[in-house]
Image: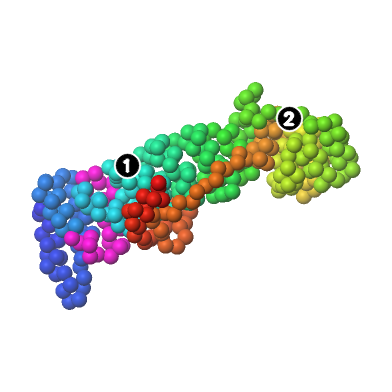
Amino acid sequence: MTPNLLPVEALERLDRQDGVDTRPILVRVLTDLFVQQPEHSREDIARYEELVGKLLDVVDIESRAAVARKLAPDSRAPRSVIDRLLADDAAVSAPILARFGDAPKGRLLALALDGGPVEASAVASRADIDDELIRTLVHHPDDLVLETLAANDAARLADGPLRTLVERAIDAPALAATLLRRMDLDPAALAPLYRFAEPARRSAIRAALSARAGRFSTPVRPARSKDARTLLDTAVGADDPSGIAEALAETLDLKPDDAARLATDPSGEPFVMMLRAAGASDEQIVRAMLIGQPEIARSVQRFFELVEIAETTPRGVAAELVYALARPAPRPAQVRREPVFEPLGVPERAGAARPAATRRPVERQDAARRRG
């Protein structure tokens, strides 16, 4: 590296000549030279550390972020420079948090717990993410962090963290879509997200539930009474859509609002699953679809697709899906921690460019009290 320092030193002498501030150029050139060299002597590292350490205090945030991006994958980067970048604005620290192999584990855990969306998302994207980080990140209050974690193929989601993410995804379509795209997850665990799934993924969920024969998490319930089954027969015979939903709610012990919502789902599949779970005959299912989903009934192809789904879905699988969609597991109360780091603006979705963030100073006692 030593021979290449000569033009850098020349730039340094030209600093602010004719009103031009060359320090942003200098810090980038120095860093480029550092990362491009296959080997460094101790003198080279010390010289780089000295020059860049001074420049980072005076150059703009874009230049500091550029240095962070270049050094993040380089394990030879001086520790003092890495620590300086980690202590900087979120836009500067994020590349180090995401890619530097020797980032302090305590720092990563603290940001996974209390960090702002940009920094916590950087931690969630790490290729070496471990179970401890995952268990912490799944409780972060910001959906962007969860989407980033779900999109990280290196994050091996055990049953507990996956269940937490699925519960959060019920009310977060973007997170649901991200989880459903992962082919390494058990499709049966994604049953509560069935309404967000594409047809092929829905088929995989039904198949995975079928493979659980004899060990459904929700037992198939018989009709609550003979009168309940009679209600369904009567409603179907009377061409009464609302009556069919009410009868299904009574038969399956569902909340009326849940039954009405599932009965009117535009895809028609939750309605078919309720009928199948209630033990309706094939003839009743066809008749109920014509009454309760007239828009779908106008499409011959879709109508017969639903008939086939009804005929090929075991009653236990239908019941499992109905209860997963109607009554997801209660979500534990989330105590929203005030992030130590607050980014400016609203972050984009996972994988998109995100705006820079400013760091809000926090007294150590206050931070400790929040974590206490």
What kind of colouring is applied to the model shown? rainbow
Is 147 displayed left or right of 26 in the figure?
right
Look at label 1 and name its amino acid: Lys
Which image quadrant for residue 252? top right
Residue occupying the far top of the picture: 214
Q: Is residue 151 visible?
A: no
Residues at badges 1 and 2 in contact (C-beta under 8 Å)?
Answer: no
In magenta stretch: residue 251: no
Secondary element at tag 1:
helix
State the separation of the CA atoms marked 1 and 2.
48 Å
Q: What residue would you read off at disc 1? A: 105
Q: What label sits on residue 242 in the rendered view?
A: none
Q: Is residue 112 above or below residue 28?
A: above
Q: How far from the left and from the top, in percent, is residue 339? A: 42, 54
Q: Residue at x 26, y 56 (%)?
A: 67
Q: Residue at x 77, y 40 (%)?
A: 249
The residue lying toward the viewer, choosing from 238 and 366, is: 366
Is 6 displayed left or right of 270 in the figure?
left
Is 343 displayed left or right of 308 in the figure?
left
Q: How many marks?
A: 2
Q: How far from the left and from the top, in percent, is residue 290? A: 82, 43
Magenta residues (range) = 54-77
Q: How far from the left and from the top, in percent, is residue 271? A: 74, 41
Look at label 2 and name its amino acid: Arg
Which image quadrant for residue 51? bottom left
Q: Is residue 28 above or below residue 152?
A: below
Q: What residue would you read off at disc 2? A: 221
In magenta stretch: residue 70: yes
The residue lying toward the viewer, choosing from 46 and 38, is: 46
Which numbered disc flags the more N-terminal residue, 1 or 2?
1
